[in-house]
Image (spheres, helix red, strand yellow):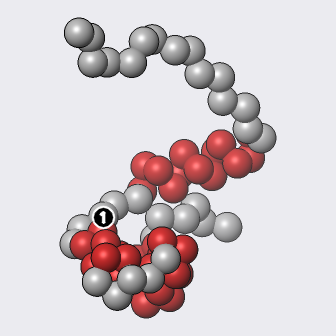
């Protein structure tokens, strides 16, 4: 019995400005132990994913601002 998914072509459509800024974010994004902090907030503190993300963003502003393109 095969366990993989069948090949599927996926078309993605987005504004060029969004794609450019998203590409910058993706290439500069880096997790360290930060993902563990977010996971702990979700599993132990029972925060929603959105609330855990907001909490991390609020306390790690200097980290995520480095991932954004210069303006």
Residue 36, horizontal then vertical, whole percent: 25, 73
Viewer-closest of 44 and 34: 44
Quadrant of res 46: bottom left
Q: In this view of the protein, which residue sits in the foreground, 35 or 60?
A: 35
In the rendering, at what x and y percent does residue 55 appear?
A: 47, 86
Q: Is residue 71 left or right of residue 26?
A: right
The quarter in which the N terminus is drawn is top left
Judge the density around disc 1: few (<14), some (14-19), many (≥20) Cα neighbours within 10 Å. few
Q: Is residue 38 visible?
A: yes
How many numbered marks are there?
1
Task: Tell me which residue sits at (45%, 11%) in the image.
Answer: 7
Nearer the observer, 5 or 62: 5
In terms of image quadrants, where is residue 16? top right
Q: Image quadrant of residue 41?
A: bottom left
Relative to the observer, which residue lies in front, 66 or 43? 43
- Residue 2: x and y in percent read 26, 11
Q: Which residue is mark 1?
A: 31
Residue 44 lies, with reference to residue 26, above or below; the image says below
Left-right relation of 59 to 44: right
Q: Is residue 29 above or below residue 47?
A: above
- Image coordinates of residue 39 in percent, x first then y, are 31, 72
Helix, strand or loop status at disc 1: loop
Q: Residue at x 43, y 90 (%)?
A: 59
Q: Is residue 63 left or right of residue 44?
A: right
Q: What residue is shown at x 33% (from left), y 61% (from top)?
A: 30
Quarter of the image that includes the C terminus: bottom right
């Amino acid at each position: 019995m095969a366990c993989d998914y069948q090949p599927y072509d996926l078309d993605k459509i987005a504004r060029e400005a969004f794609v450019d800024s998203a590409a910058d974010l993706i290439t500069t994004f880096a997790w360290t132990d930060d993902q563990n902090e977010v996971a702990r907030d979700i599993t132990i503190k029972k925060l929603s994913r959105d609330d855990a993300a907001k909490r991390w963003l609020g306390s790690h502003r200097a980290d995520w601002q480095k991932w954004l393109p210069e303006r």
